[in-house]
Image (cartoon, rainbow, N blue to C red):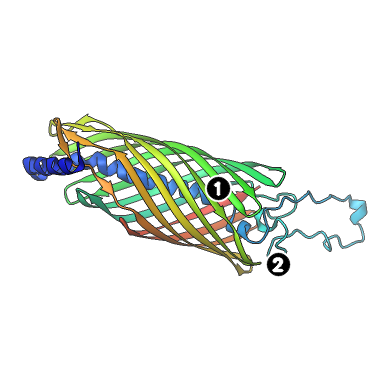
Amino acid sequence: MKPSYLLIAGLLATVTYGANASHFYANGISMNNIATIQDSILHTAMHTFDRVPAANLGDKKTMMPPTPEKSINELYGHFPMYGTMSIYGEYEEYEFAGRSGGDGKTPLLKNLQFTWQHYSDDVKLDNFGRADSRYDLAMTGITGGRTEFFDVITGWAAYAGFIDGKQSTSALQIDQHGGYAGIFSRFNLKHFNLSATINGGVLTNDADFALGSDNYTNMWAGAAANASINIILDDTFSLQPGVQVGYTWIESDSYASATGDDVSNSDLGVFEVAPALHAIKHIGSGWFGTAHVRYVAMMTDGGDLSVNATDFATLESDNFTEYGLSLEKTVGRLNLSGTLVRRDGGRDGWGGGLNVKYIF
């Protein structure tokens, strides 16, 4: 059915059902929110499992040979710290591994990490109106397996997490709970970076409205790749333009509503293109700051809604721009960072998060 006919059919259906029609769109709201949740998961995986921000300064992706260990007899009566001190990239030694690994024995990060994020947005949905969207993401993961093949350095990560969210309108409230898991791999060739990840998840939904409550489940699977290049301006400042491209398939759910209506939804496919620019700066004393701007464009296919064989208009969310600031510091074997995010456009609101890495 053509979009214009769908819109007319949706308007007629809304007139027919009156104010009681809003809960029919619950699954459409959930699927559009999953598309944004997936963007948050993918972007987080790309930029937390890659390296600490400091790793993109200078030439810090060079593999370093292990520091030779000396016996106690060789060290007795000498000052072994001179000439053997670990390089941490804070004194302009930008030709070395630096804080991308901490010292010569661990030239690239192997870590166990935990990330928590919260987002609160006002979402514009075409053919429906607005919805208030809030969700929390928690992610834990492990990185390892760093290897070097000629000039290419590779690494992998595995991650999993849970989701807690709430979508609401004046007549509808949707509580969401679920989890996800994925794997990640990256490749670095000098200043060029390529990362890729695949994942999947499940989300249960409880939609409450004046006439009752509907329950349904969504599952999804997706893959994405991110390509970027480090433009080294000086020993302490880098620009990193890049683009993230991905596709996510979201399984819909058809169910009998509490009102006795048969609600049918088709699956939703989401293709995403998100160009971005990151600026990374060594502020001093081991503090690093990162600023980024991203434009997130989502093209969708499917997600059609019908109730009792009557077609309704399909919900679609608009593109949005995201701005972010991060601050990072390594203390011993702990790497700590915090992020503040602003979104404008199809989603207006704020977000933020914390990341903790234990380096081993």
| Residue lying farthest to the bottom in this orientation | 284
Disc 1, SS: strand
Q: Nearer the viewer, residue 271 or 159?
A: 271
Disc 2, SS: loop
Q: Nearer the viewer, residue 302 or 82?
A: 302
**Comparing marks 1 and 2, which lies closer to the viewer?**
2
Q: Earlier in the sequence, mark 1 or mark 2?
A: 2
For the residues marked 1 and 2, what is the alpha-carbon distance in whole angstroms? 28 Å
Q: Position of residue 18 (x, y in %)?
A: 8, 44
Instruction: Name the kind of residue labelled 1 in the image.
Output: Gln
Camera sees residue 210 = no
Q: Nearer the viewer, residue 215 or 126?
A: 126
Is mark 1 in CB contact (under 8 Å) with mark 2? no
Q: Which mark is residue 142?
A: none
Q: In the shown orientation, is residue 204 left or right of residue 307?
A: right
Q: Position of residue 213 (x, y in %)?
A: 19, 37
Q: In the shown orientation, is residue 278 left or right of residue 118?
A: right
Q: Residue at x 87, y 63 (%)?
A: 79
Q: In the shown orientation, is residue 154 left or right of residue 253?
A: right
Residue under pointer 1: 113
Q: Residue at x 32, y 35 (%)?
A: 218
Q: Quadrant of the N terminus?
A: top left
Q: Position of residue 296 (x, y in %)?
A: 39, 53
Instruction: Name the kind of residue labelled 2 in the image.
Output: Glu
Would you call the spot at circle 1 few (<14 residues within 10 Å), some (14-19), or many (20 or more)?
Answer: many
Camera sees residue 296 = yes
Would you call the spot at circle 2 few (<14 residues within 10 Å), some (14-19), or many (20 or more)?
Answer: some
**Position of 128 relative to 215 (above/below):** below
Tally of numbered discs: 2
Q: Position of residue 123 (x, y in %)?
A: 28, 53
Q: Which mark is residue 92?
A: 2
